[in-house]
Each structure stands twice: as structure tokens, then as C-alpha cells.
Image: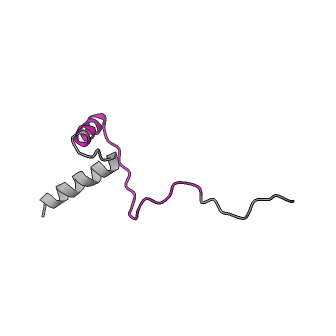
Amino acid sequence: MSGSTPDTKNPGGRPRTGVGTPVMLRLQPDQLAALDRWREAQEPLPTRPEAVRQLLADALARQT
């Protein structure tokens, strides 16, 4: 077969975004609304996962 494509591998899927253990959580509508209000007050606007990480880090820092 002439004109075949070279043997390249398509990794497919999303690239890794970091190292760590994924934690899935479900938020109730009022909790999600509160999270989004907090995010909107931040500059620059964090993603929801980053907002959860920031809030968790702040809460844990206050405990020590």
C-alpha cells in the first residue's frame, strides 16, 4: 500500500494535569452557589476544583 501513514501513536484522552489522588465530591445546590459566589470574589477567577483546593488549604492552615 503506497501512501500509508507513518507509525505514530495517538495517546488519546486528556493529558495528565498533575500528580495526586482524584477526589470526587457531590455538592448540594446551596453549597455550589456559595462556592461560585466565593470564586467570583477572587481575582483571577479560580476554577471550581482550584477554589475547593484553596478553601481546603485555608481551613487546614487555621487548624494548626
How far across and how far down the image is residue 62, in percent?
Answer: 13, 58
Q: Taking 9 as reference, is 64 left or right?
A: left
Where, by quadrant of the figure, is residue 19 drawn?
bottom left
- Is residue 14 inside the magenta stretch? yes
Q: For the point 22% across and 51% down, which residue is it?
A: 55
Stretch in magenta: 12-39
The image shows residue 55, relative to residue 32, as above or below, that is: below
How far across and how far down the image is residue 14, in percent?
Answer: 51, 54
Q: Taking 44 as reference, is 11 left or right?
A: right
- Is residue 24 inside the magenta stretch? yes
The residue nearer to you, when weighing 30 against 14, is 14
Q: For the point 23% across and 44% down, which residue is it?
A: 42
Q: For the point 28% across and 39% down, which residue is it?
A: 36
Where, by quadrant of the figure, is residue 56 drawn?
bottom left
Which quadrant of the rendered structure holds the N terminus?
A: bottom right
The image shows residue 41, relative to residue 19, as above or below, that is: above
Is the stretch drawn in magenta largely helix, strand or loop?
loop
* Colour scheme of the picture: one colour
Give the residue furthest to the front. 3
How far across and how far down the image is residue 6, in percent?
Answer: 73, 63
How far across and how far down the image is residue 47, in percent?
Answer: 33, 46
The residue nearer to you, when weighing 38 against 28, is 38
Which quadrant of the rendered structure holds the C terminus?
A: bottom left
How many numbered marks are there? Answer: 0
